Amino acid sequence: MRARTERDELSKDLSAGVTKPLCFLIVFVIGIVIGLASSSHVDRYFTSQPYNLNRGRESIPPNSPSTSSITQTTYDQKCTTSTDIVSNCVKDECLSMKSFLSQKNLSHSMTDEELFWRASLVPEKAHYPFDRMPKLAFMFLTRGPLPFIPLWERFFKGQDVRKYSIYVHTSPEFDLGVSNSSVFYNRQIPSQAVEWGTVSLVDAERRLLSNALLDFSNERFILLSESCIPIYNFQKIYKYLTKSIYSYLDSYDDPSRYGRGRYNTYMKPEIRIRDWRKGSQWFEMHRALAIKIISDTKYYDLFKKYCTDDCYPDEHYMPTFVHMFYGELNSDRTVTYVDWSVGGPHPVIFEGGDITKGVLESLRKSGKNCVYNKGTTDVCYLFARKFDPSALEPLLEISSEVLEY
């Protein structure tokens, strides 16, 4: 009897020992089956969506309601909010080298902060992966129309389009309204309102530089107004600037009340009176210096805060900043002629009746020498201002003879 009881207990123990592993095995197998089934559904879901980067746009069913909204959102986020640019971005591929190196359309939705950051990117690799021809970036800062467009178009006519680019900053609501055959067509950048004598002028200058820096072929950057004209032909100016080792940003110490008198002691200790400089806002500069200027935040903020009222930051910010940190890159002079002989806050204006061969020749040859690279030259100015719109016709009549374009 006792032996039988022991056998029954042993049988129960064996049954319990077998049952537990068997149950665990069954649960494990069921888990695998459920996992495989779920994975199959997930795979089928994602492979049905238009996220496969190896497939062209044509592989997406054109009338599929489940993919159209996702496709539009994806491309809008990767490209821009502009319908036209999105269309081009989809067609040309957002991340292609061609679209990265230069922009066909200057429209974008970047804020100034985003634009300056994007423009400040500098490749570490020494050699360009493309055939780079240095460009001159002609940057026009104006409230409204450019009355000398016909003269500028004559200046650019027949030139290699790989050697220049054009950027125009106007009032936000203004449209140049030029024909699609003009070199100024579609060259307006996203602009903001500008008030004379305020830091908004510096903002506009940095905005122009940043937009131009997005084209990696732009090497020299020229700031011009609506009243500026070129006083030499394109070939002469191109050679002069691309062969130069210096930038041409006017910078000098003016001890008068119009110079040091505008200094604000609250700028100390970052900017001291001995660092304070003044200069014409119409500059020309090398790419390396342009990047430094649009990358600055610390000193720009000081000028924005303390250079107000009668300080005129457009005459002091860049001359002071460059003098303090990058003086070895700069010639401390401008290549844009302005006649200040009459005194006052505004220069001489050349009207139609003032335009003669003699006047233009005097602008080209000022009778003095200036520093150029390691030597000197008698060609000190490449551009001149300030010209009244009435000067256009007389200039067109004698430009080919005197200005050689």
Image: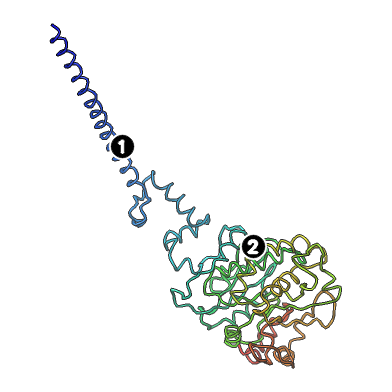
- Label 1: which secondary element: helix
Image quarter in which the N terminus is found? top left
Q: Quadrant of residue 311?
A: bottom right
Q: Is residue 151 above or below residue 260?
A: below
Q: Quadrant of residue 325?
A: bottom right
- Label 2: which secondary element: loop
Disc tally is 2
Which label is found at residue 191? 2
- Residue pointed to by mark 1: 38
Foreground residue among 106 and 268: 268
In the shown orientation, is residue 258 left or right of residue 201? Answer: right
Q: Nearer the viewer, mark 2 or mark 1?
A: 1
Q: Quadrant of residue 24?
A: top left
In the shown orientation, is residue 305 left or right of residue 168? Answer: right
Q: Amino acid at mark 1?
A: Ser
In the shown orientation, is residue 340 left or right of residue 20? Answer: right
Q: Residue at x 74, y 61 (%)?
A: 304
